[in-house]
Amino acid sequence: MLNITVVGTGYVGFSNAVLFARQHNVTSLDIDEKRITLINRKISPIADDCIEKSFVEEELSLKATLDKTEAYKQADYIIIATPTNYDSETNYFDTSSIESVISEILLLNNTATIIIKSTIPVGYTAQIKSKFKTEQIIFVPEFLREGKALYDNLYPSRIIVGEKSKRAEKVAQLYLDATIEKTAPTLCMDATEAEAVKLFSNTYLAMRVAYFNELDTYCAKHGLSSLDIIQGVSLDPRIGQHYNNPSFGYGGYCLPKDTKQLLANYKDVPQNLIQAIIHSNKTRKQFIVKEILKKRPNVVGVYRLTMKAGSDNFRDSAIQDIIRELEEYNVQVQIYEPTLQQETFETYIVKNDLNEFLSSSDVILANRMHSDLKEYQFKLYTRDLFGEN
């Protein structure tokens, strides 16, 4: 059994912690005392059915701590999964949390392999290894869905390691051994190529969302059936009947920032498509606002800030941009979001009583359908066709 420390208890970090705690001794490290307390009580700090099931059904060798010395000193592997938000002023991810963690690790443990799981700009690993004068750092991109993060670790589409070496092969095997089927393809490549794989993968997903949203916008403007056209298009096996459900726009923690970072990495490189994806998402949200305004509502009710079923995260959700633009047109907005234990969100009223929320809204916005809304179809606005993410 190895000693593995995972820094960060978000959906990437904590799903990695639970993944490895099935076979190894794992320590979760975070600066949030509430999250540490929850984990040590066997309560997941993130919404993830598979993690919650693991806590109940499996014997996990997992502990959580605020103590960096305890977390780092005896670790064989240290996985960094801290946030890297996009900074619009620098056109670059804010990687300060990663660098802070690396500097602390090297003071306490200079033999552990440091695995970066945070999303980073293309070329970052080479720069950071040079800055800290260490070869202990390796990048392993994640390809996880919020709400399904542990499942995607147990049944990965691929395992990519950003290094060509015996050590990289061991890291790939470490992840492969933790999977259920042991059949996922593994690829070892240079760190810069692995960084590009992550950003290009997410940008392709954003492009697909934007494509079907623009198809849906066309249908809405011409009175056509989006459902029929999308089903017909998606029957082509090269396109496929997946990831084709219209929405209010792509959002969440990953796609908006990753597309912007990739565009920034295109500096001095000819491109049209990458920038168009970002612009398309803005256009879609503006179209949604105009469609809502046509209904002349006094009160717009937003059913969930979370944009995906099964997720409790609404960072950078597309609906928030729509809300802010509606406010500019003096439309009153109220929100139903059961994960919020407060009376307001920013400047907007939060209604905790679902029936009161539904009855007092002139128009109800729902990015994804829910059984709660069945009786209110007459004032529901959604672009959801398939009832899935």
Image (cartoon, rainbow, N blue to C red):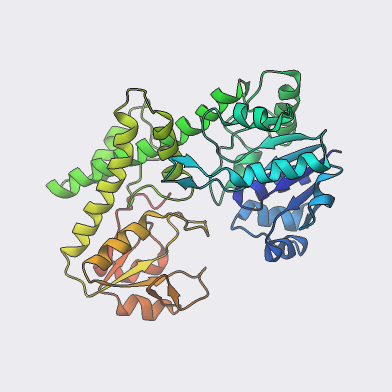
Residue 71, compared with residue 124, is above or below; it is below
Q: Is residue 165 left or right of residue 337?
A: right
Extreme residue in the left direction: 222
Image position, residue 286 (x, y; %)? 24, 53
Q: Please tell me which residue lies in front, 33 or 265.
A: 265
Count of numbered tags: 0
Residue 212 higher or lower than 352, as above or below: above
Is the residue 267 above or below the residue 261 in the image?
above
In the depicted view, which residue is nearer to us: 61 or 251? 251
- Residue 343 shows up from this direction: yes
Is the residue 352 above or below the residue 111 in the image? below
Q: Quadrant of residue 280?
A: top left
Q: Quadrant of residue 344?
A: bottom left
On the rendered structure, is 122 left or right of 34?
Answer: left
Rendered residue at 61%/52% (across/down): 10
Q: Nearer the viewer, residue 287 or 50?
A: 287
Q: Residue at x 36, y 58 (%)?
A: 319
